[in-house]
Image (spheres, helix red, strand yellow):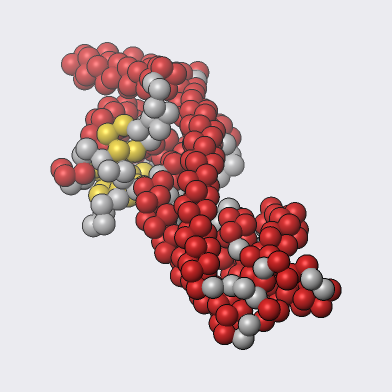
């Protein structure tokens, strides 16, 4: 009984581990259990041996797989680290109830009917029950220890993967901003402003410096910070995107419009750094931008506390320009991957929602408290 419960608590009824545990432990435990139920007479003749072995083996097998199913169900309902205490109490209560029912059935059969000349007593049944509960609690401790080690290893692997995704995303952003095409257009805009409006040129240089400062600081933090979840506040990200948007609006003039409206109480929420820049950059790469057909990007908070990034859709053709050929789709994939990794570390984090129709391209970003 105890071994069946012990194994059942460690894995699902249909897993290879459970099946092997059943095959390796049940024969030995069944002999021991038969002796407890029947007494020394268990070895007296082959009829007693065979009959008690068949009856007890059937009862133990049914109980074993019932408890395995229940353990698996409890683990699925309460999987998180902060649910450990609840998971342990629910498991103990469930196994205690099943053990009680099983031993009542045993008492009814062996004491009530005196099967196989059993010497079993109520006192012995109670002693077996208490020993069984002690074994259950011991197994729970061992099981939770192994689970904690497994979660820790999984968390470490995810941290490494998330660090890699952060570095990849920031590298893509840096590559985009220092690419010859981007620098040529930026410096060309600056050259025009110096000749036409030195005051605006000075502001342009300031905004350009803020963009590169944020990119370099974020990239540096990704290598030095021990917390690889690497989240930044929405306020910092919006401050950066305003500077980045200033460069784009200076370059494209009336062809580029950026509207930002976010509720103040959401400013301290967090998102992966450079998320907004990657989305704005993708919108610029994929869409036609002209004064007659302006690209309009909205960054808005939603009623349920998320962030919506939306742009009107006017896709470039393959011959519309070299920038379209440079786009690899890495930015959006990087954002989705980051959220997936964060969700593996903290299960209640929602995932980005991407929507597209003939008018708009929209990404809903969860804001992390």
Task: Give me the residue at 30% from left, 38% from top.
Answer: 270
Is residue 24 among the parts visible in the rendering? yes
Count of marks, rendered view: 0
Quarter of image, res 92: bottom left
Q: Indicate left or right for 171 with 42 as reference.
A: left
Is residue 65 among the parts visible in the rendering? no
Task: Give me the residue at 58% from left, 55% from top.
Answer: 6
Q: Quadrant of the image for the N terminus? A: bottom right
Q: Position of residue 167 (x, y in %)?
A: 48, 25
Q: Front-most of 281 and 111?
A: 111
Relative to residue 136, is residue 293 depicted above or below?
above
Q: Position of residue 299 (x, y in %)?
A: 29, 45
Q: Front-most of 209 and 38?
A: 38
Task: Give me the residue at 73% from left, 71% from top.
Answer: 41
Relative to residue 321, is residue 358 depicted above or below?
below
Q: Position of residue 246 (x, y in %)?
A: 28, 29
Residue ranking furthest to the bottom:
113
Residue ranking furthest to the left:
264
Q: Front-most of 170 and 157?
A: 157
Q: Position of residue 40 (x, y in %)?
A: 71, 66
Task: Give me the residue at 44% from left, 18% from top.
Answer: 223
Q: Quadrant of the image for the C terminus? A: top left
């Amino acid at each position: 009984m105890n071994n069946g419960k012990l194994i059942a608590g460690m894995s699902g009824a249909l897993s290879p581990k459970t099946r092997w545990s059943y095959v390796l432990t049940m024969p030995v435990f069944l002999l021991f259990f038969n002796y407890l139920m029947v007494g020394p007479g268990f070895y007296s003749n082959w009829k007693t041996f065979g009959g008690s072995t068949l009856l007890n083996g059937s009862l133990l097998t049914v109980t074993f797989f019932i408890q395995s199913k229940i353990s698996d169900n409890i683990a699925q309902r309460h999987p998180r680290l902060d649910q450990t205490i609840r998971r342990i109490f629910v498991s103990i209560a469930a196994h205690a109830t099943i053990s009680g029912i099983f031993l009542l059935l045993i008492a009814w059969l062996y004491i009530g009917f005196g099967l196989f000349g059993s010497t079993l007593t109520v006192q012995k049944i109670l002693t077996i029950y208490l020993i069984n509960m002690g074994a259950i609690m011991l197994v729970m401790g061992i099981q939770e220890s192994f689970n904690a080690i497994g979660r820790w290893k999984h968390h470490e692997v995810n941290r490494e993967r998330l660090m890699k995704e952060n570095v990849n995303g920031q590298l893509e952003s840096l590559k985009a901003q220092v690419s010859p095409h981007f620098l040529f257009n930026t410096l060309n805009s600056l050259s025009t402003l110096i000749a036409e409006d030195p005051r605006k040129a000075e502001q342009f240089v300031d905004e350009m410096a803020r963009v590169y400062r944020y990119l370099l600081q974020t990239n540096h933090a990704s290598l030095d910070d021990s917390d690889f979840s690497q989240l930044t506040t929405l306020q910092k990200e919006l401050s950066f995107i305003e500077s980045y948007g200033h460069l784009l609006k200076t370059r494209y003039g009336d062809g580029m419009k950026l509207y930002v409206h976010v509720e103040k109480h959401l400013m301290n929420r967090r998102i992966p750094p450079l998320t907004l820049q990657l989305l704005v950059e993708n919108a610029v790469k994929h869409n036609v931008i002209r004064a007659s057909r302006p690209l309009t990007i909205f960054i808005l908070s939603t009623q349920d506390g998320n962030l919506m990034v939306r742009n009107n859709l006017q896709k470039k053709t393959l011959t519309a320009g070299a920038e379209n050929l440079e786009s690899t789709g890495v930015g959006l994939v990087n954002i989705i991957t980051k959220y997936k990794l964060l969700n593996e570390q903290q299960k209640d984090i929602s995932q980005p929602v991407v929507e597209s129709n003939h008018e708009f391209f929209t990404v809903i970003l969860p804001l992390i408290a």
